[in-house]
Image (cartoon, rainbow, N blue to C red):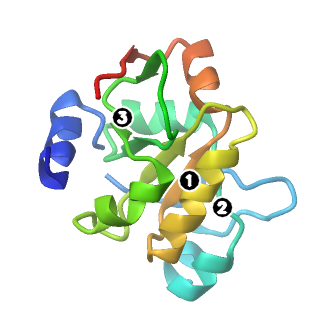
Amino acid sequence: MTNSLNLRAVLVAGLLLTPAGAAFAQQPAATPMPSAHAAHAAAPADLATAEPRLILLDDVKTRMAAHEKLIVLDVRGAITGEMAKGALHVPVDKLEAWSKDVPKDALIVAYCACGAEGTSKIAVRRLQELGFTNAFALKGGIQGWQAAGMPTEPYKP
C-alpha cells in the first residue's frame, strides 16, 4: 500500500483529524510547554534537539471528538495483538520513507507498547529531525489506549 493510500485509509477510518493549536499537548515535567505560537515559530533545528513532547490520552480524545485531523502511528517494531483502530503501523526505522508525503505541520501522535513511551519518544525525536513540528508521544502507549476503552483492531500486516 502506498503512503498516500495509507493516509486515505486513516481518513476513511475517521482518525485523520486538523492540526490545531498545541495547547492540549503535555510536556514532560522537566520541560515547560511552549505556547502554540512558539512551537510554530521555532526553527526545525531547535525542534530536532528539543525533548520529545507528550500528549495525554484525554487530549487525544478531545481532539478526536472535535474532528481535528490527527495521524496516529503505531511505532512498535513488531505487533502482537491489537493496535489503535485506524492507526498506521510505521516502525521507527521506516519513518523517513513514510514521512516523505506527509505535511511537516501534520498533527502526529505516536505510541508504542510501554507506558514509559520509550519507542514513541524515539519516533517523535526522529520526526522532529525530519522537520515535523507537531509530533507527540502518547502518554501510556497502547496499554493506556486500551485501558481507556479506546477502539482497537487486530494488527493486519
Determine the residue positioned at 15% across, 33% down: 12
Q: Residues within 10 Å of mark 1 (few under 14, many from 20)?
A: many
The amino acid marked with disc number 1 is: Phe
The amino acid marked with disc number 2 is: Pro
Could you tell me if the residues under marks 1 and 3 are in contact, i.e. CB atoms within 8 Å? no
For mark 1, what is the residue? Answer: 136
Residue 52 is labelled as: 2
Q: CA distance from mark 1 to mark 3?
A: 14 Å
For mark 3, what is the residue? Answer: 87
Residue 24 visible here: no
Q: Secondary structure at mark 1?
A: strand
Q: CA distance from mark 3 to mark 2?
A: 20 Å
Mark 1 vs 3, N-terminal side: 3
Instruction: Where is residue 99? Give x, y as percent.
Output: 32, 63
Compared to residue 42, the image places residue 18 above or below, namely above
Q: CA distance from mark 2 to mark 1?
A: 7 Å
Could you tell me if the residues under marks 2 and 1 are in contact, i.e. CB atoms within 8 Å? yes
Mark 2 vs 1, N-terminal side: 2
Determine the residue positioned at 51% across, 46% down: 110
Q: Residues within 10 Å of mark 2 (few under 14, many from 20)?
A: many
